[in-house]
Structures are given as structure tokens and as C-alpha cells.
Amino acid sequence: MRAGWVLVLAATALPGLTVAAQPASADPTGYHIYAHGFLSNGIVGYNASDTDRPTSIQGKPMPGALNWPQAPSPDGRFLFVAPGTNPQLIPYAIGADGELAATGTPLPLPDVPVDIIFAPNSRDAFVVVGVQNAQVVPVRIGADGTPTLNGSPMPFGESLDGVASGTVSPDGKQLYVASLLPRQLLVFDINADGSVSPVKQRVSTGLNPIYPRVTPDGEHVYVVNEISGSVSGFARSGDGTLAEIAGSPFPTGMLPHVTSITPDGRYLYVPNMGSGHISSFAVEPNGVLTPLPDVAFAPDRPGTFAESSVMSPSGGVLWALGTDPLRGGEEILRRFTIGSDGVLDLDESVAVYTGTYVADGRTLSLVPRR
């Protein structure tokens, strides 16, 4: 399906932060959840918690359509989006009640943005661009949220190589970028000034690798293979280079997408855009993924599949965003509790239709209350 959206963009002229492991705990203050649609304009927000019903946040900023990415700064102060029809990185300040307010000055981008990735320091970010010209654009975030170029963009591929997505290691030393058509996971070093080195390693993956994720302890890296229907796993060495884990790749459903991992690093969840369930895995100490029971995303809504997911700060709840074809592709937000054994349990009382459409991309964010 992502290949289809690539063609949509081509026709118009033209796809995280990982924090240190910590034990699950109660969630007394709740958090904000933001969603947008790839094929619709507007960001909707909800105040939510592990137990209460989500309530709508006032306002609906309109950054533009054909929008794959959004990402909050790790400190929870800003939310950034990047529309494809008018390539720019747009900052919004996050208010006390989760309301979004335009702030700072948007940064024009040199090509179509596919992903926004933050370093743990909340100051440095990286925008992967380039349906035509693959580049990592290093960005420095100002006090008011204004993004500015932090050195020259780093080219890393040929035409269409830039349909890519990424993540930063917990120590902030490496950027990992999944490059779609070449079937590779790329390793960049992050310099002290927030710029990136040229690619220092390319490892092979399955078909259409997207949305890599580093475990909270920094020991392993996983990337979903969209067309292969699997997850490739890699051991991460001290210098950030990768070696594939024995038994990798690990099968998922059809068209796996944006994963989530518990804060303690014990469980990994993979929504499937082409299947009706979320794939669940226990993460073994050696990085091997052991399958857990699959859980249906929307058993009462045939053809409604999950695409994007986020983890609550407590590690006790997984939120997933999917697309309902029977409502013209409208997105639906659902909540799953996570058992002590890592098995998901659908909370059937939460089924929020967002008024945004087609959950393709990193279209869901969770920001703890400050």
C-alpha cells in the first residue's frame, strides 16, 4: 500500500525517540495523543490515560495534506509535522491541556518529507526527505520551537532511495534509516554538533523496510519489512554497527507498520496494515523475537486494519490507529491493555473515529503531560 501512496506523490510532482528502560508504573497524570491522516488535512488531539476515556482537545491545526510524518520533541514542548504538498517542517507548541498553537517559523525542506526523528536531547532532529533525492536534513530546534538547518543535508542514495524512515539510538550516537527500495538499513554516526556522518554501514533487509526501532537498552535494532511481512532484527555493537540476529527475519501479518516496544524492552508490537490483527512478540535477551498470541484490531469492523502505534509511558497500554474502509478511509483510534505476560487485550469501550483519513505513515504521537 505504501508503494501506492508513493505513486500518489509522484503524480503531484513529485514514509522516535527511544528512552532508557524503566519499570512500568501507574500513570497518574495522563498524556496527549495526536493523529493526522495521510490523505486529509488537520491534526486532532485527545487527552487520555491508561484507564479514562479519551476526550477531545480543542482546535485542529491545518498543516496540509499528503502528510506522512509527525513527531513530538522528547521534552514534550513541541509537535512537528511535515506535509508533502508544501515541503516544510512546521512547529506547534503543546499547551498545558494539549492544545496546539503555531509557534516559531517553519523550515522549508529540499524534497518531500517522509519521517521526522528526534535525538534524546530534544535539540537535534533529522528529517528524512527525498522521494526524488534521498537526504537526511539535520535540524536544530530553537527555544521557541523554530527549526533551522544544522549544517548541510547528507545525501544517501539515488532516486526513490529517500522513501525512508528512521530512529535514533538511546545514547544519541547513531541514526538508523530504513531505505525502502534498496532493501537496506543504513547506519549514520551523529556528530557532537548534531550533524550526521556519511553512511558508514548498509545492511540488507527484507522487501520495503520501514520504521526501525532500537530497544531501550540500545542492544538491538528491529525494522519491519512491509512487503515481506516480517521483522528483521540486528544486534548493535559498541560503535553502532549491526549484525543480523539468528532466526531473523521473524514473520508478522501482511504489511506490518509502525511498531511499539514496552519501556522495559520486553515486548514488541507490530500493527499490520494488510491483516486484521496486531502481531506481538516477547524480546529475548539475545534479541530473538518469540511470537505471542495475535490480537484483532477491530473484530467488529471487517477490513479495518491498524497501521500506527504508540506506547503509554507506563508500558501498560498500547494505542493503535487504523483505517476503516467502510467509512471512506476514516481513521479509528483503539486502546489495548498489556498483560504481565505481554499479551494484548482490546478495550472494546474505546473506538474513537478521528475525522482524519488514511493512517499511512507515522500519523500517531503520544506526549506525556508536563
Image (tube, rainbow, N blue to C red):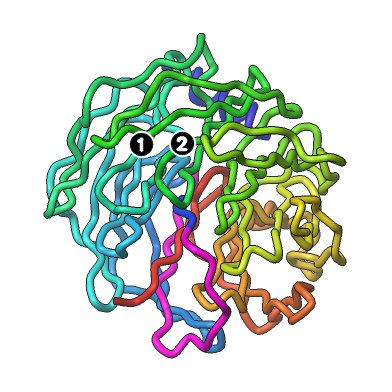
If the image is split into quadrants, where does the N terminus sit? top right
Instruction: State which mark lies toward you, 1 or 2.
Output: 2
Task: Please state the horizontal and vertical placement of residue 289, each as a whole percent of the image.
Answer: 80, 53
Asked if 162 appears above or below 278 in the picture, the reply is above
Magenta stretch mostly in which secondary structure?
Answer: loop
Residue type, mark 2 in image:
Leu
In depth, the one of 147 and 219 nearer the eye is: 219
Kind of residue at badge 1? Phe
Q: Position of residue 293 (x, y in %)?
A: 87, 66
Q: Residue 175: which disc?
A: 2
- Helix, strand, or loop for circle 1? strand
Labelled pair 1, 2 in contact (Cβ < 8 Å):
yes
Marker disc for residue 126: 1
Task: Give whichever of 304, 96 is nearer the camera.
Answer: 96
* Label 1 – label 2 distance at C-alpha: 9 Å
* Quadrant showing the C terminus: bottom left
Quadrant for residue 195, please give it.
top left
Depth check: give the residue in front, 293 or 138.
Answer: 138
Residue 205: x percent and y percent? 72, 28
Question: Residue 265 vs residue 343: left or right?
Answer: left
Q: Residue at x 54, y 66 (%)?
A: 21
| Element type where label 2 sits in the image | strand
**Magenta highlight range:** 19-38
Task: Name the residue located 43 percent from the left edge and 82 percent from the top edge.
Answer: 30
Q: Residue sitting at 68 percent across and 29 percent down?
A: 208
Figure check: 289 above or below 227 = below
Residue farthest along the front direction in this orientation: 238
When the figure is inspected, residue 102 is found, relative to residue 313, above or below; the finding is: above
Residue 21: within the magenta? yes
Q: Residues within 10 Å of mark 1 (few under 14, many from 20)?
A: many
Q: For the point 21% across and 34% down, which residue is it?
A: 107
> Residue 129 colored magenta?
no
